[in-house]
Amino acid sequence: MRPAPLFPLFAPLLGLPGVGPKTAKPIAKAVGGERVLDVLFHLPFALVDRRARPTVAAAPVNEVATIEVQVIAHRPGRPGGRSPYRVVVADETGEMQLVYFKAEGDWLSRLLPLGATRLISGRVETWEGIRQMPHPDYVLAPEEADKIPPVEPIYPLSAGVNARAMAKVVLAALELAPAALPEWLDPALQKREGWPEWRTAWTLVHRPGRAEDVSSDSPARRRLAYDELLANQLALSLVRRQLRRTRGRPVTGTGAMQEKLHAALPYRLTNGQDQAIAEIAGDLASPTRMLRLLQGDVGAGKTVVALFAMAIAVEAGRQACLMAPTELLARQHGKSLAPLCEAAGIRLAVLTGRDTGAARKKLLAGLAAGEIDVVVGTHALLEGEVAYRNLGLAVIDEQHRFGVDQRLALAAKGEDGLDVLVMSATPIPRTLTLTAFGDMDVSRLTEKPAGRQRIDTRIVSLSRLGEMVEGIARAIASGAQVYWVCPLVTESETTDAAAAEDRFAHLSARFGAAVGLVHGRLKAAEKDRVMQDFAEGRLKLLVATTVIEVGVDVPQATVMVIEQAERFGLAQLHQLRGRVGRGAAASFCILLTADGAGRTARRRLETLRDTDDGFVIAEADLQIRGAGEILGTKQSGIPEFRLVDLDRHADLMEIAHDDARLILERDPRLEGSRGEALRYLLYLFERDAAVRYLASG
């Protein structure tokens, strides 16, 4: 249960001063949530320094200044006209004007009475040679000077909430932050880094005394970032321990089915695949449960490695399941594995949410009776009605699409210790791997299987669109199939779909019924139907958004066109490119770029053109764009952090990783004084599930 001192932070923001039913919605949108905690975690991105106190004549133009002036005259705008209301103010060095647009009522004459002395703070501008300050941020009597913050943090806003209102709400949230929480930091680390205690850190960020206080590199910001990273690493370590808590049953294969698989494969496995299979076999034979990550580039042959792992389980008399993120991918896995399973004598079935009625009942009965060795499916494999006779191994494809809780639900299906192999086709650097997978054992496939051709990648200006379309016509005439991926316009699925629909209309005018369209707004059944038509050759050109990124296997597709490629992340472009080059014919990837694309964008695309090594590309993306950009893509599999800037705080990840491991070695149930404090940390960052794992031992 959440500790009582944290209750105020999880209260609705509607209770904060200045937040009513009207303002709650835009504030919640700006801060990304509807609780006081979300407001507290809303970090400033810039500062306004109001410490400069120049005279009117000395105030720098286009900078913020705080000036003491006397009110000289009011000059209201013409009634019904567009001219603003101007208030003339002055000091001993000269005059300036305060400018108000849409000034109504007599509030300005009350705010700025003639002859009164006022402190004004805002940006100084000039208009027709006259100094002016449009809509000053502060207008106060000199005795109220302490109400003007010397350094004012600036927060991201949304429509319906202004900077002043946001600052007020944040300070109200800060007041509700517990005055004292038990310290969860290692004292030696805290002293070495010079980090303030928790409440002080938040005060420095939201009530800074100087610009350095809100910098990503400030002790306060680094401490808060470390808190979030430590909560993440501790939760991952607890999940790992929970998965391995029950001792596994050693699984040792006879080699008979593996031998038949080797004979049935049309190619020889790479050294990397052989090594990964050996590592997995070692894990399976161990009395502790396997939790291994298999990282491999697009086309590196992860599924074949997984099949050998499942064959070992079946040889030992266990069942295995392979869980994919979509029905389309599950059926595709089933289709590609079927001939190999048949050759090896492995009884294979596919189960998705679409399987219903008598066929579903029969399949479930076969699983429960042990008549099926390997089942491939979606999250449907987690449903309560799906029972196994002797499930020993779970393989999870595209791991980042399955949350920790789903992983544990799957693990619970194995009564005497389920071994888990997770696969990811997103090559990510070590620091980022730690954020997503924590302390998992990792096997990496870095070679391509024999016969895989390098994809000819070219950067082409969007101004040559007409030439491109004619080139596509020639490719289709020669028997090729083509993907045309439309840009990620915004985070909105609707606008992405609109961009794809526009391109579909344009290409349909040229190619007619040979063109298909898929995007995120289509129903799953419709999407699958179009993909099936493309896979079976009824469609020659597929216009799509990034929904085709994962898991589509059409060997006869040899051309990938990516429109406005500069809008995509490098890792995502690499994933998309991997949709072609799966057959014997030469394949091409055309990166269509806008003429105005910047130098950095060009550099990224040249990296993609010059290498097909996903790990090299991932490292380059990290160096060029930084972690924040990489993590912005929905497919990255990295948790979204609120307080961490991985570009600036990457060094803290390794420390948090080691700290979490040491904590659980010394105090596995978090029962000591630091352990109790760390429970607060887990609740604060909503890793409640991890605390439940503690309770379950």
Image (cartoon, grey):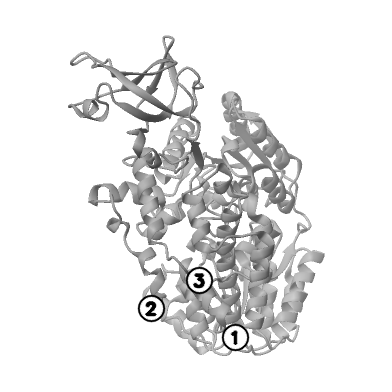
Q: Amino acid at mark 3?
A: Leu
Instruction: Report which residue position mark 1 lands on.
Output: 245
Q: Give the quarter of the image for residue 335.
A: bottom right
Instruction: Report which residue position mark 3 lands on.
Output: 682
Q: Give whichever of 560, 489 is nearer the camera.
A: 489
Compared across the picture, whether 125 is left or right of 429 comes to left
Identify the residue at horizontal 61%, vertical 51% (top origin).
218
Label 2: how many Cα within 10 Å (few below 14, some 14–19, many 20+): few
Q: Give the quarter of the image for residue 343.
A: bottom right
Looking at the rendered image, the disc whose residue lies closer to the viewer, 3 or 2, is 3
Compared across the picture, whether 500 is left or right of 582 comes to left
Q: Is 682 drawn above or below residue 58 in the view shown?
A: below
Q: Is 300 drawn above or below residue 166 in the view shown?
A: below
Instruction: Give me the C-alpha separation between circle 1 and circle 2.
Output: 38 Å
Label 3: how many Cα within 10 Å (few below 14, some 14–19, many 20+): many
Mark 1 touches mark 3? (CB < 8 Å): no
Looking at the rendered image, the disc whose residue lies closer to the viewer, 1 or 2, is 1
Instruction: Give me the C-alpha separation between circle 3 and circle 2.
Output: 46 Å
Q: Amino acid at mark 1?
A: Arg
Instruction: Report which residue position mark 2 lands on.
Output: 358
Q: Point out the tag, 1 or 3, that comes first from the N-terminus.
A: 1
Identify the residue at horizontal 51%, vertical 59% (top origin).
200
